[in-house]
Image: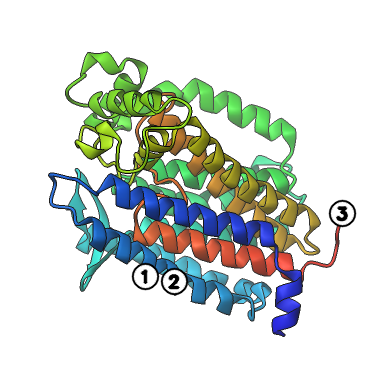
Amino acid sequence: MWLRIWQRCDWTIIISTLLLVSIGIIAIGSATHVNQTGLDASTLVAKQLMFFLVNVVIVIGLQFFDYRKLKDWANSIYVITLLMLLAVIFVGTSALGAQRWIEIGPITIQPSEFSKLLMIICMANMLEPRYEQLHTFKSLVFPVLYVGFPILLVFMQPDLGTSLVYIAIFIAMLFVSGIHLRLVRIIATTGVLLLPLAWFILKDYQKQRILVFLNPDIDPFGSGYHIIQSKIAIGSGTIVGKGLFNGTQSQLNFLPENHTDFIFSVIGEEMGFIGCAIVLLLLFLLIYRSIHVAYTCNDRFGMLLAVGIGAMLAFEVLINIGMTMGIMPVTGIPLPFISYGVSALTTNMISIGILLNISMQRTKYIF
């Protein structure tokens, strides 16, 4: 069994993940090395490393499990997901103007993070029997309602960023499920026409983030501060960076949330263009391999799972790095495997475990 796992593992996925987590732990340590916010660098690094090692054990254990059995549990997983999201609304804790977390003893978890992977499993199970049958609006009613309710619960927290991740995953999985292109054109056109109406359902701080995205200078010491400092940090890193623990924006705490949402800015400042390019290459390899696994998978459920995981990673990378460079609004989406966060790291590691499991059990090899 061990020899089979060793021979059939996708080592590109494994090595890329290990390197990304290693870079992330180093960057977290550097970002919190000198601070005035009460953060303990050694505690954060130790906690991230500890949960990474725990997740490594989980990932290894998943290789002895047939991912197809997830189909049998999909309905229960869907109910659990809804209960978790409802629990956040009623008993969750608030921070930074949002109620997204649940405290369990010394650990604070974010159910909306876990729900992304859980919903990928549920969506794959729901779409498999509808593969290449999504030709009418009637055929889309149930899938939209099925996914729409969890999205609404996440949006109510409010968590616009994670809601958009849900939508991106759903669109990607619909596309590979063979949705008729005529429906895509009609939905896309309708969405664009109705987009201005979305302004009226956004919270005030969400509207402010969009305005600041369009022009950070309208509030340089308030909502625009994050973006301005982030761009200064990345730009000042030039080619090779200022060196670990030598960044000015991150070490002197000019850069807010530098160990979570804006960790890429720390990498840009201290490791420069070369460090950023390495991180982007590793993330690209993970996304590419997820597409490859989906393309070479021998069953639709596994293919949909791989596509969902790849879409989740791709969209999170696009939004997080985009917001640090000022080309996307600030949404609070972490950078996969690099940003500090127990919930995000666990979700991404288990996603990799499932992806490796699908890769190991596929039988159709294309290239």
Amino acid type indicated by mark 3: Ile
* Residue name at image x 80 percent, y 57 percent: 296
Q: Please determine whether, in this image, residue 152 is positioned above or below residue 217.
A: below
Residue contact at pointers 3 and 1, CB within 8 angstroms: no
Left or right position of 113 against 358: left
Furthest residue in direction bottom, as rendered: 1
* Residue name at image x 26 percent, y 25 percent: 208
Residues packed near mark 2 inside 10 Å, few (<14), some (14 to 19) or many (20 plus): few
Q: On the image, numbered disc 2 is attached to which residue?
A: 53
Residue contact at pointers 1 and 2, CB within 8 angstroms: yes
Q: On the image, numbered disc 3 is attached to which residue?
A: 366
Evaluate whether residue 283 shows in this view: yes
**Front-lying residue, 177 or 340:** 340
Q: Secondary structure at mark 3?
A: loop
Amino acid type indicated by mark 2: Leu
Residues packed near mark 3 inside 10 Å, few (<14), some (14 to 19) or many (20 plus): few
Q: On the image, numbered disc 1 is attached to which residue?
A: 50
Tell me which label, 2 or 3, sits earlier in the chain: 2
Q: Please determine whether, in this image, residue 26 is positioned above or below residue 97.
A: below
Amino acid type indicated by mark 1: Met
